[in-house]
Amino acid sequence: MTVHIAKAVDLPKDLNGLTNLADARIGASIVSCSDQFFAAAERMLQTEPAQFIDGKYDDNGKWMDGWETRRKREAGYDWCIVRLGVAGMVSGFDIDTSFFTGNYPASASIEGCYAAEDQLDQVEWLPLLNNSVLSPDQHHFFQCESHKVTHIRINIFPDGGIARLRVYGQVVLENIEPDQVLDLIGLKNGGRIVAFSDAHFGHPNNLIKPDAGLNMGDGWETKRRRAPGFDWCIIALGQAGQVEQIEVDTAFFKGNFPAFCSIQAAYVENATDAQLIPQSMFWSFLLEQQPLSMDHKHGYTSEILPHHKVNYIRVNMIPDGGISRIRLWGKMSGQ
């Protein structure tokens, strides 16, 4: 069977730098939906690009990588309620109909609410996106007035399929004590990858996932370097803060772990991602070059780390190889 992968697209400028709050990796889930006869709604929340597999069928028909409802034969429309992975200030959406050609919805709207799970029956839904026309096999980017929400409800008119749903916003951390230590670069806390040198075998997004690595494929791994230099990635902290401890985990990387790593850091305001790449070469070292071992969690304590406010780090992987996870434990600083 031939597998086709949806092409990557660049985010609009106004959505770049925001977190996908409807990402299954940070706990986003389906609360309920009107119908999912052809394809389960939870597939909309997967991180990986949608795929199409020629000739793959299941008991209900053609297998599709997304949420797909049956053909509606009565008045009304289909809907799905998504619990976001974390509360956030939602600013925009990507309604992706990749590979849905003769079975995409004619249009869609989105509503949001801020509520506990057991209060959804009484909640008043706030319009975030008016009913908007959709097209086959493409990404649809929309912006909205920023609102704090915990759940969204997507309505499709009258029926059909959506490959992926992205809900972009700024993470809002709730019930955080002033002295609480948290992972400042964690995906669930708003951390994001800004840029990287290479991701041939594994994307650096894996570094900031909330859970431990599953295998060697669930980490950042570069190709074998055949030229001078080393690999690197720049990570934006979800919350600016003062670092107290760093963890560099090479779990599952045995014959391909880096020989060394170092971490640089800075507090930078009003810089574009492109501007950060050359600037990062001159940032101060948060962690001087340290040797790494195979399949091991390396911890570096506050005694060897400077205490200053940072909101970006650059991880240098010397010369190449793979790292499973990185944690940057610290306390939030006032913005």
Image (cartoon, grey):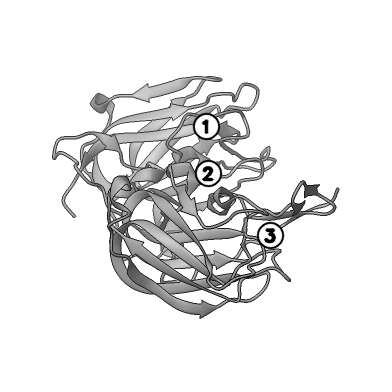
Say if 244 sits above or below 292 in the image. Answer: below
Residue 205 shown left or right of residue 223 in the figure:
left
The span from disc 3 to disc 1 (Cα, nearest Å) is 26 Å
* Residue 136 place in picture, x, y as percent: 67, 73
Say if 111 sits above or below 209 in the image. Answer: below
Q: Earlier in the sequence, mark 2 or mark 1?
A: 2
Q: Which residue is mark 3?
A: 6
Residue 24 shown left or right of residue 127 in the figure:
right
Residue 184 shown left or right of residue 1 in the figure:
left
Q: Residue at x 55, y 48 (%)?
A: 42
Q: Quadrant of the C terminus?
A: bottom left
Q: Residue at x 73, y 71 (%)?
A: 102
Q: Amino acid at mark 3?
A: Ala
User: 10 Å neighbourhood of mark 2: few (<14), some, or many (≥20)?
Assistant: many
Check if mark 3's residue and mark 1's residue have beta carbons within 8 Å.
no
Q: Is residue 185 visible?
A: yes
Say which element carries label 3. loop
Q: Quadrant of residue 5?
A: bottom right
Q: Is residue 194 visible?
A: no
Q: Which residue is mark 1?
A: 324
Disc marking residue 204: 2
The span from disc 2 to disc 1 (Cα, nearest Å) is 9 Å
